[in-house]
Amino acid sequence: MGLLEAIILSVLAASTPLLIAATGELITERAGVLNLGVEGMMILGAACGFGGTLLTGSTIVGAICGMLAGTALSLIFAAMALGLAVNQVATGLALTILGIGLSGLIGAGFVGERIATAPHLYIPGLTDIPYVGRILFGEDGFVYLSLLLVIAVWLFLYRTRAGLILRAAGDNHVSAHALGYPVLRIRLYAVMFGGACAGLAGAYLPLAYTPFFIPGMTAGRGWIALALVVFSSWRPGRLVVGAYLFGAVTILQLHAQGWGIGIPSQLMSALPYLATVVVLVLISRARTGGSTAPAALGTVFVPDR
Amino acid sequence: MQLVLEKRAERSTAIALISPLIAIGLTVVTMSILFVLLGKNPLAALAVYFITPLTDGYSLQEIAVKAAPLVMIAIGLSLCYLANVWNIGAEGQFLVGAVAGSWLAVVTHGSDAGPWVLPSMLLFGAAAGALYALIPAICKVRFGASEILVSLMLVYVAELLLDYLVRGPWRDPAGFNFPTTAEFDPVATVPLLIEGGRLHLGVAITLLVVAGAAVLLGRTIKGFEIRVVGAAPRAARFGGFKSNQLILLTFAISGALAGLAGIIEVAGPIGHLQPGISPGYGFTAIIVAFLGRLNPVGILIAGLFLALTFIGGEQAQIAMKIPLDMTKVFQGILLFYVLACDSLILYRIRLIMPQRKAADGTA
């Protein structure tokens, strides 16, 4: 296996959790809700996903456990931000703090345990094609799932009536409400979808990326996913580009550390975070003509019956 | 049958006063359930968390020492939150302040530098924290980038910077390869208030900061402008307040306070620079700010309460083998309840019975 092939494979693996989490958050934000708790939902998804696979030996059970954990946390968020009209920024922060704490409690017994990583696709003949075979036909299931997810979300947002209604709720909740659409219920479903995706993205880390659980193993990926949604201008297609770019930065800095370039490893490790800042500045600056964010993003809605 | 929110005609003062207490009560109930789930006696666990630390003088001083950075950071954050801008990177500003101040302690180590070292370190720490906080603020006012995400990303960068320095250029040559600087000289150490005790000068500085914030918010035009920009941005524009300047100002103040708290922590209770100097003060301070209702005196009380949970959490780990992460769970739940109860100041919850339509013929 050539070096380039190895790099591409690891970039895909590093990008997938970002892509899954960001896709979920994109739907949440398109419905007008800013859930800053992605990091918390991810880390709880990682802990529960690892636990599920450790107990049953099944990657699928682990993935489902992760999704359920993320959804459960997102329901707390929904009860607060939608049910009680609490400030969404503060609620999202609380969710992150709670998620980190809970994952530590749950994961306390997992330290030192190992599980088998998710199986990779193998199609005789196709996967054996030199250079591109492993990349196209030899990934783990999550990689294909994440791309299907983006396509499904794109179709949903732009090609279905339900998607149009969801965007309406996110752009102008007063009008959507006046037209008779149940804004809060739409937002509830969107928040739950975001939670399930974040939980799945978190579960990917111990199930497919590294075969063990470490407290804090998400290392800010939830926040980077939030930045990716901004980077994508709330469009699913650009999300793929953004996620793979960030995956590439993460992997290149790892390889650069391996090559022993005379740069402190900590500076290289800081690159993904610094890149996020630079990207946020550039993208926000390019958009001075008018914002592409959903117009009602982050605002509370209390229906007047 | 359905529960709906209904806006109150005016803020409910009664609920505003008791809502933090309701929140704490609900948190204690939830914690008890969690303790039962963990197989611990809830009454004994709660006693270790909330009562034991109050029973001896050493723990009481320790609470004040832990509360000092929390309160100092939260005071700064409350200014940002009042102005409706979201600095959530106080943890990073705390670390950068600690690093900048420590630089002076490291370069003067072993020399016969005079008593000017400590005051200069505190100044360096505050200035570095302010500059670090200005990065997200400038990105926000100049380019419109989200201050939430930028300030948070810089936390990770600050952690890595600290890690690099104590493993690389600043590592104590006599430190057996541990990632730490040498112990600071006496002139670079925050003095104790009472010899042999735990209280240090930083605790006194924190009280001054609380008083200063109370004056700023209650008695000055700037404080008034900060509140108006946050509560009624349109009114602030008509009033001619420069909201961008206020964003920069509130970020700079909160960064300076976080940086000051960082260098005091390092030059005081810890005594040297090492990774892990903060058990998440910058994030816990967010809870302190909200639990204290963004009011300086409230923050002082809230800071003492959350410091109590840090100490109680450590004792519960030793005495009852309750994982330390329980403290974070506790803090997260508490913030949820605080925010939920705050909602009841503006709204009331009403139970709505379904109205039967006359056309149904069933009425």
Image (tube, grey):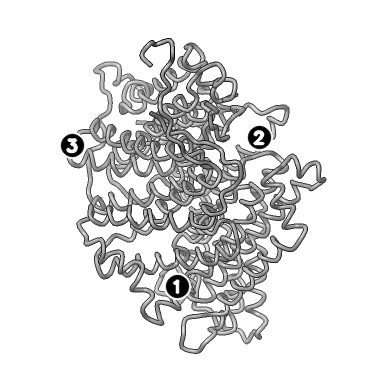
Farthest-out residue, bottom: B195
Q: Is residue B61 visible?
A: yes
Which quarter of the figure is the C terminus of chain B placed in? top left
Name the residue tied to disc 2.
A284
Q: Give the image location of residue B147, x and y in percent.
A: 62, 45
Name the residue tied to disc 1.
B63
Q: Quadrant of residue B259?
A: bottom right
Residue at image point 45% right, 65% down: B305
Which quarter of the figure is the N terminus of chain B placed in? top left
> Which mark is nearer the camera, 2 or 1?
1
Q: Is residue A129 left or right of residue B161?
A: left
Q: Give the image location of residue B223, x and y in percent.
A: 72, 57
The one of B189 and B167 positioned closer to us in this rendering: B189
Residue at image point 54% right, 23% down: A169
Q: Chain of mark 3?
A: A
Amino acid tagged 1: Ile
Please say if the residues under marks 2 and 3 sit with CB atoms less than 8 Å apart.
no
Quick one: label 2, few (<14), some, or many (20+) residues within 10 Å?
many
Amino acid tagged 3: Gly
Q: Is residue A3 visible?
A: no
Name the residue tied to disc 3.
A57
How much space separates mark 2 and mark 3, taking CA atoms?
45 Å
The one of B58 and A14 positioned closer to us in this rendering: B58
Q: Chain of mark 2?
A: A
Secondary structure of residue under mark 2:
helix
